[in-house]
Image (spheres, rainbow, N blue to C red):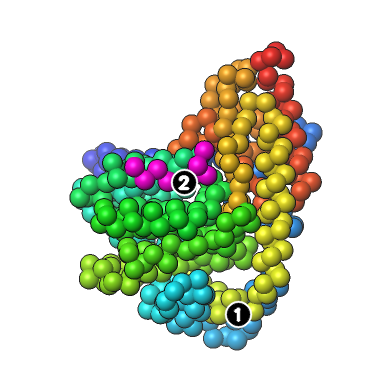
Amino acid sequence: MEGRPWSICRQSAGAPLATAGSMSIRAVLDRVFSAVDASGPRPVLAIGNGDPTVSAFFRPPLEAEEAVVAALRSRKHNGYSPSVGVLPARRAIAEYLSRDLPYQLSPDDIYLTAGCCQAIDVMISVLAQPGSNILLPKPGFPLYESRTMFSNLEARHFNLIPDRGWEADLESVEALADENTVAMVIVNPSNPCGSVYSHDHLAKIAETARKLGIIIIADEVYDHLAFGNKPFIPMGIFADMVPVITVGSISKRWLVPGWRLGWIAMCDLNCILKEAKVDKSIESYINITNDPATFIQGAVPQIIANTKEDYFMKILNLLRNSADLCYSKIKEARGITCPHKPEGSMFVMAKLDLSCLDGIQDDLDFCCMLAKEESVIVLPGSALGMKDWIRITFAMDIPTLENALERITSFCQRHDKLEA
């Protein structure tokens, strides 16, 4: 007997999700990977994603691994955790973040999440209201873009200026903001730019946000991964001027992105967020989402307490050396320029001069042809809001990185219009 057509087939229920998902780094890199010649004689060298653990040179500290083993063997962390996270882990993270602040965070200011990505998801969902908008950096981490789209929150983009060390264009911030603007996002150290903001620039950002009456979401997942002339300074030091919501994780500094342990920290000295009940909204949202693994939460206090400073310095030296190599090699490739030497995080943005390159239409075309001809994977800048740029990850061992960059140079030479 025939019935009515299935209602789900008449609905476009998956359309917003499909659009948001297509903007992810994974989706774009999958498209680039599909261009690789599977019969090619050389191994694929992937310098487009942000997972440093693919290199044997970037390993977590032994103390972190031992802390996880101890947490498991204690048999104290096999059950469910409170939705906000277990108290010892929240206390340890509050103390860890407070080391760099002129005030002390409490465990009640900390909410544990399944990685920094869930922290972003929570904050975008909490702030999304009909007719509201949020200011995002361009270039930026595309998860913000996809989450705002999926949450029906309008995204407005302010520029980061390459020739000024990727500083935020605060004039464009002021022009974009209105009475419906709920927040602006700052990523420091920067993914994808590799920049580190000075105290002076962060102060100007804070003053701009204060004047506009908007909060700051400070994405500091790469906290302390600063190896240039400028130290990492947390946005939270300006919480006396403007409410700051910091999102972070152990993923990058401890090189454990697969452990999925992140946090939201409310730096709210003037209680503006509490008066607006943002804390209650965060609690309500995380009550209906998944928690980070309880045994990882149980290990956090010892992970933070036991990891030696020598380990962090070793990782910074590795990143500094690979960043220097990456910057110098990019300058050898015709048709690619790098306006700013990376000072932090694990990435650098490079601009394509397509007028020099024969047969290449745009950044996606460049990346797909590079994958096909050289088996090298880089991320198209259009995935980050910067058409005809590319993002390169330098968090890997020197020989592999040098090999990949030499292949890029060969590719550019082969497509050089002067040579064609």
> Residue drawn at (59%, 59%), measured in percent from left and top?
225
**Image coords of residue 48 (percent x, y):** 61, 43
Point out the tag, 1 or 2, that comes first from the N-terminus.
2
Q: How many marks?
A: 2
Above/below status of 107 relative to 189? below
Residue depicted at 67% across the width and 26% down the height = 334
- Above or below, 316 against 146 in this view is below
Is residue 198 a member of the stretch shown in magenta?
A: no
Q: Nearer the viewer, residue 379 or 216?
A: 216
Question: Residue 294: x, y in percent?
Answer: 51, 76
Quarter of the picture holding the N terminus: top left
In terms of depth relative to the viewer, which is nearer, 271 or 191? Answer: 271
Q: Residue under circle 1?
A: 305
The magenta span reads 163-171
The residue tagged 2 is 167
User: Does dot 1 land on a helix, a strand or a loop?
Assistant: helix
Q: Quadrant of residue 316?
A: bottom right
Above or below: residue 292 compared with residue 362: below
Question: What residue appears at the point 52 percent right and 30 percent down from the top-left corner?
Answer: 388
**With 210 as the anchor, is 336 left or right in this view?**
right
Q: Amino acid at mark 2?
A: Glu
Q: Quadrant of the C terminus?
A: top right
